[in-house]
Amino acid sequence: MMTYLTRALALALVILAGPAIATDTVLTVTLNGTPSTARHFDLAGLEALGVEDVVTVTPWIAAETRFSGVPLRRLLELAPAPVTEIHVVALNDYTATIPAQEARDYAIILATRRNDQLMPVRDKGPLWIIYPLSQHPELDTTTTHQRMVWQISRIDLQY
Amino acid sequence: MDFRSLLSSSRTSSWIGSQALIELEKTRTALATYRAERRPKDADALRLQFDIFWSRVPLLSEGREAELMRQVGSAPIVTGILLNLESILPRLGDRGILSDDTLADLEDVLSEVEAPLLKNQKDALNLKADLAETLVTDGLNSAVWIFVILFCSAGSVATVAYHQIRTTEQFAERTRQEASNISALLTGFENFANALPTGAVIFNGDGAILFANTAFENLVGEAFGGSKEEALETIVTALGSDSATSFPQKARDGVFHVLDRRREDNLAMRPIWGATHWLSQPAWVLVLQDVTDIRKAELALMRSSQLATLGEMSTAVAHEINQPLAIVRAAAQTSLLAISRGQSDLSLLKEKFIRIERQVVRAKAITDQMRMYGGSRDKETATIDLGHCVRSITGMIRSSLESRDIGLDVEAPVSPCPTWGSRIAIEQALMNILINARDAFHSGSDLRLDAALVRVRLIREDDFWLVAITDNAGGIDQAVAETLIHPFVTTKSGTGAPGLGLAVAHGTIKEMGGTLTARNCSGGARFDVRLPYRQEDATDPASTTA
């Protein structure tokens, strides 16, 4: 999977007027931690789930930034039963757990683009969990910041 | 700065620095892994890890969380580091093999960016300590300064004892919120620490363990046995310190070995340590990288080069052994002739047999020395007398040189020249260099004003021993000189000998804390081996013998 990712990112580095679609896995989604349920998404497949924008400041970028990506609540639909927790794993094995209810209550997205550009690993890509902090100041807490995982490679839906 | 922004600004500042440093170390490991076996997937893993490290750098100066780091001047440091990383980027490419030049340069870049990162980290920690002092003396009430002190602990958190805080209802609500922030931080830190594939342990000046991650606990259970504290003592003494309470005095860098009880094998570990705070007390964080697999691959490489060197040395050995055999044969023939002629002078025969016995002893000494090279005795490290090594190795190659009309001039002190490491490994390295010098006389010009000569000098240079091996076989191209230590580069054509020898020599010497350099000197080439002057205990408590 590392190889795929590198190739996907090589494409991501090319800045095009329109979206550049990579054809290699950027995300693996599993259910209840079971490997046999693994579903692999390339960028096109992920964005096909539907894309929304979130414009927000973050603790790491001073200016308001427009992020586009798949709403987290859409990902919940990949599970056959109501999801309780979303377990997110990054490329460097950093993990965080997001209560599924938060994904239903807020427009949290799994961002694939920043200002329409794909995000290389060097820029915290390819995938980044973005909370609508500017719209919901009550979310601007340490707990939330911990959940805004970048360089995501795997998501496990627990139910 | 108000209370809240102080908390968020100091929250993860040095945390960010720690993360950057850890990703830097992981990049080094990825580089070593690739170098060991050259698998394409390891090249890709190295590129990815490089990108992950890169992504950490701007965090030190951008955004809210970098407030504290900016105060100690992180912005220009970040710019400098990014420039450095950018310079090596084109050579990494995005697929395919990586050349040795690129790997060496990448290694240099990583070392260059490490120093400013460390300094920035230390400055941030010191500043936080200052901030705490300032706020306390400004007369903030005790409730607030508890938080401030706690937050001024780098990457550390604590649960708050509410009952110690006298508050109004509103303040209580705010402290509850901050307390939940604190425990979120704790969870985040634990997540991060437990995700590390390396064992990490935080301990204080009393040797008490304040935090240990999952990987460390696994190490303790599987490899060390005993309690975490006992394992810590073992590690700390293996690093050269007297105990955890006096750490890091005398602690040295470099791979050390511990016995893995379960696997009944040696684990090779590389330590990284640094100062930190935990619950506002100064503490040490020690991270252990398991480099056993890398070491094993390097050993395998070294053994294959030993065999290659053995192949080359077999002619020298044959020559050495042929001499005593020739004498034995002559003695036997003379005796047989005497007997067949009816000569019954026993004293003549006795003299011949004595001569035969002496030659057999001489031949056995040669085969004994050869047998040492086949074994993989890397685990034995001890105090080595470098002078003895030099004399031993030059003695072995002397006749091989003489048979090619190459002179050998050796100068080494008779008094002990102590360094520390594996005797076999350093003898191997010196032999490789000498063989290289010997072979240089073939490919060089046939016209020489002076007689062919290889000169070996061992002298003390400050804290180092310098073994200078020079030849007058004609110079080497300077660019080639620099690459000779890289594997598979050889100026010997068609000999079938892969140019592994010098590369392995370089690796060995480097691991012993020394350097190997090659350059031209008048009429020939000069290889300088520098090894640290070291008087260590002959018995290293943590190294084991097979």
Image (cartoon, coloured by chain):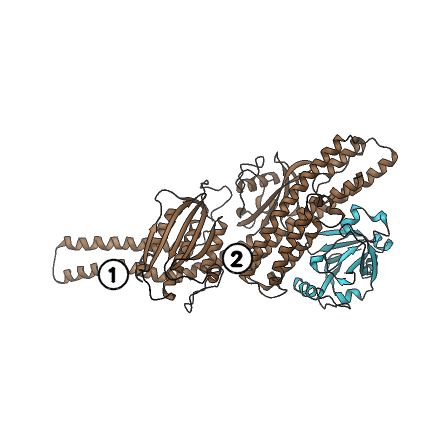
Chain colours: A cyan, B brown
Q: Identify the residue position indicated by label 2 in the image.
A: B297
Residue at mark 1: B326
Which residue is found at the position 51% from the left and 56% from the top? Answer: B298
Q: Residue at x 62, y 53 (%)?
A: B26
Q: Position of residue B469 (x, y in %)?
A: 39, 54
Asked whether residue B421 appears in the rendered view, the answer is: no
Instruction: Tell me which label, 1 or 2, sits earlier in the chain.
Output: 2
State whether residue B213 appears in this view: yes
Q: Position of residue A146 (x, y in %)?
A: 76, 49
| B465 to the left or right of A42 | left
Q: Quadrant of residue A78?
A: bottom right
Given residues B128 and B278, the one toward you in this image is: B128
The amino acid type of the residue labelled 1 equals Ala
How many numbered markers are drawn?
Answer: 2
How far is the residue under mark 1 from the one under mark 2? 42 Å
- Position of B238 with respect to A12 (left or right) is left
Residue B421 disc label? none
Q: Quadrant of residue A28?
A: bottom right
Query: Which of these two is toward me, A25 or B153?
Result: B153
Q: Of helix, strand and loop, which one carries label 1?
A: helix
Q: B335 or B80, which is in the foreground?
A: B80
Q: Is residue A123 left or right of residue B2?
A: left
Residue neighbourhood size for the residue with mark 1, other residues' Cα within 10 Å, grouped as few (<14), some (14–19), many (≥20): few
